[in-house]
Amino acid sequence: DAGVIQSPRHEVTEMGQEVTLRCKPISGHNSLFWYRQTMMRGLELLIYFNNNVPIDDSGMPEDRFSAKMPNASFSTLKIQPSEPRDSAVYFCASSLQGQNPNYGYTFGSGTRLTVV
Amino acid sequence: AQSVTQLGSHVSVSEGALVLLRCNYSSSVPPYLFWYVQYPNQGLQLLLKYTTGATLVKGINGFEAEFKKSETSFHLTKPSAHMSDAAEYFCAVREYGNKLVFGAGTILRVKS
């Protein structure tokens, strides 16, 4: 298994532009999570999906952020318009949800976003 | 809501010395606890986890952690530090619904 795949690895964009981050979870996993990591705020959960349905988006900072999961093998996180304070590393993780807590998360390598 | 506190944002040890990274949690239900490691420019990798059963759990790379309910702690240890252990370590607790809440992280530095 190739693990959780995120693209792009690095993204540099100008303020005001639209940014789309992509994630392919591990095949068979039914939960997907988007995290943002910054020096100031650490790891923040933005949103998570179970069976392609958004369950908790309380961590999404503003309406400029949106996430979709059109099918079990793909998710996007979009920022429109982007701002310099959105600069961070964005991680996607997937898991097999259920009563058995033995399933941990598998993280992707992250997308480093820089908004100038 | 559950929360995690990691004592010490930076820990420095000499190569060969004991590694001790502290984690305390708050939870109103029996917790599921995890330690993750993050190497520079990489994602988080699961080191070990406690769910039920034996309170001393062993993970990868010689790390282990002990769940102490009375102290609400889940400290991570390794008897002898190696240079390759230098990384950032995150403690996490699983909330109901499969959501993981992470601590702020502890950066481990290993001196030669």
Image (spheres, helix red, strand yellow):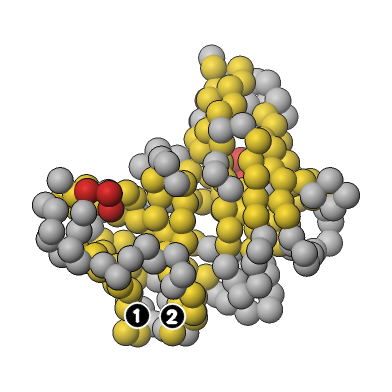
Residue at the location (30% across, 70% down)? A63
Query: Which residue in the structure is indicated by mark 1?
Result: A69
Q: Nearer the viewer, mark 1 or mark 2?
A: 2
Residue lying at the far right of the rendered structure: B70
The foreground one among A14 and B67 is A14
Q: Is residue B70 visible?
A: yes
Mark 2 residue type? Pro
Near mark 2 (Cα within 10 A), the count class, few <14, some 14-19 or many ≥20, is: some
- Which one is nearer the viewer's eye here, A64 or A8? A64
For the residue labelled by badge 2, is the local secondary structure a helix, a strand or a loop?
strand
Residues B102 and B79: in front is B102
Outermost residue to the front: A62
Q: Residue at x 14, y 53 (%)?
A: A15
Q: Chain of mark 1?
A: A
Quadrant containing the N terminus of chain B in the rendered view: bottom right
Q: Is residue B76 left or right of residue B110?
A: right
Q: Which residue is mark 2?
A: A54
Residue B104 percent across, percent down from the top left: 54, 44
Q: Amino acid at mark 1?
A: Met
Question: Which mark, residue A11?
Answer: none
Respond whether the residues carrying marks 1 and 2 are from the same subunit: yes
Q: Residue A16: horizontal and vertical position, in percent? A: 13, 59
Q: Secondary structure at mark 1?
A: strand
